[in-house]
Image (cartoon, grey):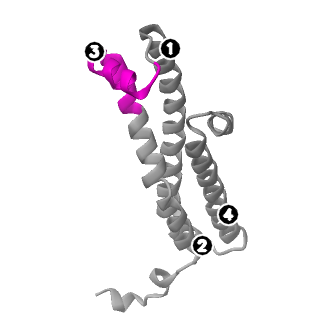
Amino acid sequence: MRPWVDGAVDHPRLALYGHLVREALGWLDDALHHVVSLVGNGQIEAGFLEATPLLEIFGDVLLGWMHICQAQISDKKLEELYSRAGAVDERDKAACALRNPEIAFLRGKLAASRFYIGRVLPVVRGKVEALKRKETAPLDIEEGALG
């Protein structure tokens, strides 16, 4: 995972998104260490209580990684296609997208990746903070209170 993220961090057009994915990997590490610590300290039920939130966090971060990989591949291919078409500025590039379905597709991939990484992935931070609160109320409910 990290080589792709590091490549994006150094990328002239994708650095912002690479940094966001790198930050999300740190949040995932925090969540994993928290759950492992719970289980390692004998709080197995509390650890199991975090299984679904942890899987959700993992899935969100994994999608961020997939998007940053796709963005790098799409950007490289777009630059090749723009160069062949002689497109130098954004106006030329947008015009190419109207004539070439592959360019339009790749621009869409980049837009989807930027949106996911920029708007959806940051929510992971709140999910990790909630997971680390170690709220065990479901384990504390008496059986008779469940109806």
Q: Is residue 58 left or right of residue 112?
A: right
Report, in whole angstroms, how far the alpha carbon at label 4 lies from the one at label 1. 45 Å
**Residue in front for this viewpoint, 88 or 118:** 88
Residue 54 x %, y %: 53, 60
Q: Which residue is mark 3?
A: 99
Q: In this rendering, is residue 64 above or below 13?
A: below
The residue drawn where x is 56% and y is 35% is 13
Q: Which residue is mark 1?
A: 80
The span shown in magenta is 88-109
Residue 9 x %, y %: 65, 40
Say what amino acid the circle numbered 3 marks. Arg
Q: Secondary structure at mark 3?
A: helix
Residue 40 x %, y %: 72, 68
Say what amino acid the circle numbered 2 marks. Lys
The residue drawn where x is 50% and y is 32% is 71
Principal secondary structure, stretch drawn in magenta: helix
For marks 4 and 2, the one nearer the N-term is 4
Q: In this rendering, is residue 144 above or below 47?
A: below
The residue drawn where x is 62% and y is 51% is 25
